[in-house]
Amino acid sequence: MVKQESFTSLLHDEVMSEMADNFFSARKAIDDEIDLFEAKEADVALAGQRALCSCALLYALLQGEEGAQALFDAIGVDVASYGLHFKVRNVEPCLFLRLPWGITRKRRFAGLLVRVYQHVYSAFDRYLNGSGYTSYHAVQTYALPETKGSGQENGASSFDKMSGMMGKVRSRTVGWKRYIAWCDEINARIEEVNLNQPPSQVLGMARSMDVVGLAQEKASGGGVDGLVASMDRTLCLRPIACHLAGVGSLPALPDPEEVESAIRQFAMSFYTREHHAVDKTIADLERALDCMLNPDACS
């Protein structure tokens, strides 16, 4: 009888330990991934600020939303559904690149507009899709042990000698598209854990194995049977917000090489109509030396 009770106790402890490991490990894994997800939000936010900073210069050169809209229409880009005008509205522009050389001011403006569009295209692409980068780290290598009589002094082993070499790791930053997909993946896992392992169900199963405790609760009129809904509301994992970082979705722009001629043609026509305003805008931007040639000034 004693052996049977001891076996039952061991089985009970093993089952309870397994339940606790499954319950808490699933939540710990999600918590760790949420921490990593939130750490990457700053990268998405910074990329979004740089994208809007580049775009603000384009808007300034084209004298506001109407001129920018005309350019986007000329290259076939829908920006209205993305609210781009509203997002750029309060961003201060910076002239972060040198003015190109041109025989006439009109040609110089056309070259400038092409270069600014190239920056906007690159910034939008980095924000939406992330960008690849290579990081370097030191790798420690150990020499094989030397044979007897090889000149090793004081009995020191060559395992004590380490040589460092640089290793390359290719990675990619998290862009807006991956950020949203990642957020949806985490929320799907949270929903699955809450559905398969609700706290009230796990606690109820654990209580059902404690025969003595149940008997005492019945005798005293205690228990948690009426607190199931409240317990799940309090202890279940909460979904994370998917739109806190960045500036929302931005339009995918056509490759600069494909639309360069259209941008130059548009710039020449625009400068003919608005050359006084354009020259004044460029002069004002050149005087803002705090952001001249500094692409990170608005970040």
Image (cartoon, rainbow, N blue to C red):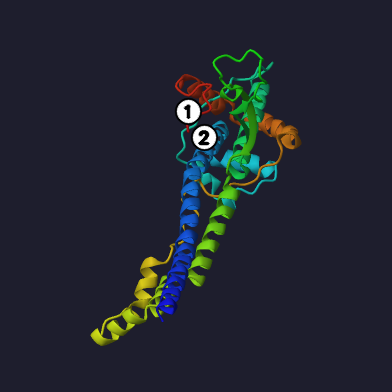
- 19 or 38, which is in the foreground? 19
Classify 240 as above or below 6.
Answer: above
Secondary element type, mark 1: loop
Mark linked to residue 297: 1
Q: Is residue 258 visible?
A: yes
Which amino acid lies under the numbered mark 2 shown in the image of this protein? Cys
Q: In which quarter of the image is the N terminus?
A: bottom left
The reply, left or right, for residue 210 in relation to residue 186 is left
Name the kind of residue labelled 1 in the image: Ala
Q: Position of residue 213 (x, y in %)?
A: 32, 79
Q: Where is residue 208 in the image (x, y as percent from the top left)?
A: 40, 80
In this picture, is 126 found above or below 145? below
Residue 104 disc label = none
Residue found 50% across the figure and 51% down from its top: 33
Q: Residues within 10 Å of mark 2 (few under 14, many from 20)?
A: many
- Which numbered marker is on residue 53? 2
The one of 266 and 296 positioned closer to us in this rendering: 296
Q: Distance between the residues labelled 2 and 1?
A: 8 Å
Residue 90 position, x and y percent, is: 45, 40
Pointers 2 and 1 in contact (CB under 8 A)?
yes
Residue drawn 50% across the image and 24% down it: 285
Q: Nearer the viewer, residue 161 or 33?
A: 161
Image quarter of residue 258: top right
Local SS, label 2: helix
Q: Which of marks 2 and 1 is nearer the N terminus?
A: 2
Rendered view: 224 above or below 58: below
Residue 246, position as x, y percentages in the image:
50, 45
Mark 1 packing: few (<14 Cα in 10 Å), some, or many (20+)?
Answer: some
